[in-house]
Amino acid sequence: MRSVSKVRGVLKNIRGLVIGGVMLSVVLTMSACARPGPGGGLETVKQAVRESSSAFDEVFVEEGLDGFSRYLFVELGLTDETLAADALEDALRAIGETVPDGYESVRLIARGSSGDMLDLEEPLEASGLDGVFMIDPKMASIPVESLRVYADQS
């Protein structure tokens, strides 16, 4: 009888260790995906893009999570209804120079002065930036490493 209760006690301890291990791995996984501290460098990106060209009157920067991949969302607000290639290139360099570590990609959109989203496919193609994935003609996903290389080449 005593051996049965010893076995039950051992099994109970093992079960507790397994559950504890699972809980620890969940906590560690969640903390790895946690947001950086207040500001987290996003204000730096916003300011750099805004100052990169007079074509931008408003810049919105936010972070997002797609599964376990962190991305930076950047919305360019233009003073005009068209996005000049040189203004886009200046914005891409500014993002590449200031994007904080920990992000895998940047999702980019541009809005004209009326608030309508603008096509990005042709201006991005003309920029020569590698690795651009067009989610649709008005939204692009760009690997952070490609933006950093692009900024360094200038």
Image (cartoon, helix red, strand yellow):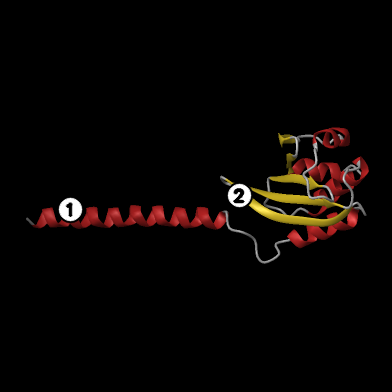
Report whether 59 appears left or right of 68.
right
x, y percentage for residue 39?
Answer: 71, 64
Residue 21 occupies which quadrant of the picture? Answer: bottom left
Looking at the picture, how far across and down is residue 24, in whole percent?
44, 57
In the rendered structure, which amino acid carries the disc numbered 1?
A: Val
The residue sitting at 23% across, 53% down in the picture is 11
Q: Which residue is mark 2?
A: 65
Mark 1 or 2, closer to the camera: 2
In the figure, 134 relative to 60: above or below?
above
Residue 143 occupies quadrant? top right
Name the residue type under label 2. Answer: Leu
Secondary structure found at label 2: strand
Taking the image as shown, residue 104 lies to the left or right of residue 26, namely right
Q: Position of residue 74 (x, y in %)?
A: 75, 50
Q: Identify the residue at image location x=80%, y=56%.
A: 59
76 and 27: which is toward the camera: 76
The dot on residue 7 is: 1
Question: Closer to the N terminus: mark 1 or mark 2?
Answer: 1
Residue in the image at 78% along x and 46% along y: 116
Q: Quadrant of the C terminus?
A: top right
Residue, far left: 1
- Element marked by disc 1: helix
Numbered badge on residue 73: none
Q: Quadrant of the N terminus?
A: bottom left
**Who is closer to the viewer here, 30 or 125?**
125
Q: Going by the picture, which residue comes out furthest to the front?
A: 114
